Every structure is written in structure tokens, then in C-alpha cells.
Amino acid sequence: MTTETQATAAASGAGATARFRENKHVNAATSKERVSALAGRIIKAINETVIEEKVSYDEYNALKAWLIQVGEDGEWPLFLDVWVEHSVEEVANANRHGSKGTIEGPYYIPNAPVQNSPATLPMRHDESGTPLLFQGQVTSVAGQPLAGALIELWHADDLGFYSQFAPGLPEWNLRGSVIADAEGKFQINTIQPAPYQIPTDGACGALIAAAGWHAWRPAHLHLKVSAPGHQLITTQLYFQGDEHVADDIASAVKPELILAPTDRTDGKGREVTYDFVLDPEN
């Protein structure tokens, strides 16, 4: 057993909670009327479910205990990102004309090491997995190349673990920020990530087991792509043929985000081209 496979839901959840507090500046400036409308609707929906489904006190107390455990395990970021964020993302990006976005997930770390394209993500000298050349171009919706666009890329390793959220992995393993060339083009060498299960030894795993669901996410690349004067896009790219593209537990897969890698002619792994189109800032 490698060190990284000893990762626990509690440790990962605590890390995700800490990172959220560090990196997200929560200032919604929401009116009392808006808070009342949203909170009131959510509370009403819960009470309607209780009445319609005839929830017993035993079930109610089990829910209360589970909610407490989610907090103790630090899994609120995981729970919300897996089961709620996809709807928030849909609302947020409804008016985009460029590339499709999807959820950020709980494992983003800002300020990854910066390189110019062509680049190779930081990785161990014996990193397992299939080498992957990820390349493309960043343009505006008008088709103008966006020189110096920034491509932030992070993903799980060949065992399905993320650096900074599993023990034994180098700090920036398979995380990087790459600056596109004068034509907005980029080339990034990495490895093809593996599908993985979200942590199942904590409160979210208990819910999955109790409901008889599966915990799998298809293999994917996480990306944030930005350029001056244009809206940042947060997205994920998936791989054709993955068993869980059709039933991702996080409901984040979109047809436009599925890649079809091909074998490289030099025999050194696989390659794929994907172009990003950025909307202008509002």
C-alpha cells in the first residue's frame, strides 16, 4: 500500500474546508429580502418532504446525526460540490457564448507554479500512468487569438488522488499554470488521470452506502482559463469511453467536454487537442 492510498475522508475534508476558508472571499452582499426568500424556500421544501414522505422521528434523528457528522468530517465542501454545485454553475454560465463550464470541485489550489508553453506539469520522476499531451488554442468569441492566456490545470494521479489532499504526494504534483504563446496556443505534458471514487469513509460515503448509490467520478482534467478583458472559465474535460461519463456522481459531465485522445505517432502516450473560447468581460 502506498502512502497516498492511506488518505482519509476526514483529512481530505478538513483540507478542503481549510482551503475554502483561505481562498474564497465570501461577500454576497445579499439583501434581507433575498436571504428570506432563499432560506424560506429551502426550509419549506424540507418540511414538505417530511410531511409528504411521512418522515419518522428515528429518520429525523438519523438525519440530524448525519448532518453533525458531515461537519465533524469537514465534508461540507465535498457534499455541496458533488450534489449542488452543478446547478449553481448552470445558472452562473447560462449566458456564455464561448466554451462550456462545469464545476470547480473542492480540490482547487491557487498559485500553482507558472510555466510558459510548451510545459510539463510537476510530477514524480516515476509518475505512473499514460503520458498525455494536452494542447489547443485560446481565442475570443470573435475568433481572435488571446496571446498570453493563462491555463490553470490540475487533476488526480493514476490512482485517483490529488496532491495536497492525500499524504505522500509532492506539493504541486500534477498542478500547474501555463502561459499560452503569442497565438494563444498551448502544449502541456502530463499523464492521463484515473477515474476515482469520492471519499467514502466519511459522512458522504455513509449517505452513498445508505442510498445504494455509487461514488464514482469519471477521469477528468480540471481547468481554469483566463485572459485580460475576458471572463474566466472554470471547467473539466472528460475522456470518451470512460465507464462513468454517463452517470457521474457529481452530475458535471456535458457532451461538449468529452475528449477523444489518440495515440501519439512517436509512441509516447496519447494526445488530445481542445480549444477554449472566452467571452468578453461584462
Image (cartoon, rainbow, N blue to C red):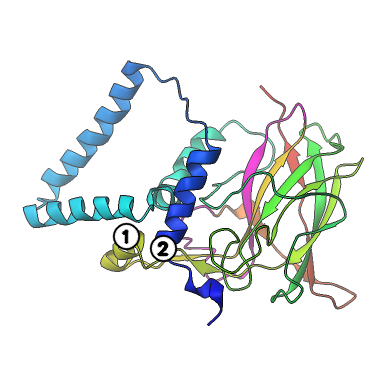
Give the percent coordinates (x, y) of residue 262.
78, 70
Q: Identify the secondary structure beneath mark 2.
A: helix
Query: What range of the chain is rendered magenta?
Result: 228-252
Give the percent coordinates (x, y) of residue 126.
74, 77
**Residue 193 sits above or below residue 184 on the image:** below
Q: Identify the secondary structure beneath mark 1.
A: helix
* View extreme (bottom): residue: 1
What's under tag 1, amino acid-wise?
Ala
Q: Which residue is mark 2?
A: 9
Are the residues at dot 1 and dot 2 in contact (C-beta closer than 8 Å)?
Answer: yes
**Residue 150 sits above or below residue 106 on the image:** above
Residue 214 figure quarter: bottom left
Is-magenta flag for residue 248? yes
Q: Residue at x 90, y 75 (%)?
A: 266
Is-magenta flag for residue 70? no
**Residue 195 sits above or below residue 227 on the image:** below
